[in-house]
Image (cartoon, rainbow, N blue to C red):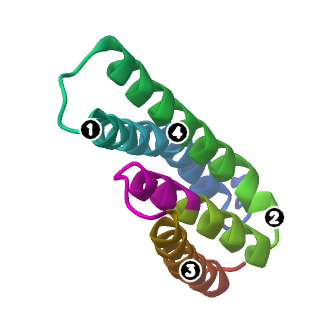
Amino acid sequence: MAHAAPAAPGRHRQSADMTHLSRGAYVRPLLLGLVYGVWAAFLERQMGPVDAANVFYGILCGLVFAGIMFALARIGPRMMREVHAAAYGAFGGIAVGYLHSLTNESILRSVVIGLAVAVGVGAVAFYRYYTHEE
């Protein structure tokens, strides 16, 4: 009696993981871009009335944030883990530093907060990529 040949280990799981990653690759940047855009529009408003320019600014900031995050999610796995972690660290630091600059605080304070976030995000990303390497 003939039997089916066993599949390569992990082959079935890989196809299931790819569908999960493709959904998450779109949903996560869109949701975080939405939050970032609303936050940027709120900070830009400076307690004044909401107008069309403020709404457009929030949409633009959210789209740019989501686009960069989507690109990092697609291109990042092909990078070395150190470069991948540095890219996420730089992205996180720039994003938070820019949001802080919208509060009309000192630019030096925005740079320091951005650098601190960049170092933290880069370290956490490197730890994650280092412990989950193939």
The type of residue carrying mark 4 is Ala
The residues tagged by marks 1 and 3 sit, at their Cα atoms, a distance apart of: 32 Å
Q: Is residue 49 above or below residue 19?
A: above
Quadrant showing the C terminus: bottom right
Along the horizontal axis of the image, is 47 left or right of 122? left
According to the picture, the residue beneath numbered tag 2 turns out to be 79
Position of residue 70 relative to residue 2, above or below, is above
The residue that label 1 is drawn on is 42
Marks 2 and 1, the one that precedes in the sequence: 1
Start and end of the magenta stretch?
A: 94-106
Q: Of 20 and 26, which appears nearest the observer?
A: 26
Amino acid residing under circle 3: Arg
Mark 2–mark 1 CB contact (< 8 Å): no
2 or 4: mark nearer the eye: 4
Looking at marks 1 and 4 on the same chain, the residue that comes earlier in the sequence is marked by 1
| Residue marked by disc 4 | 66
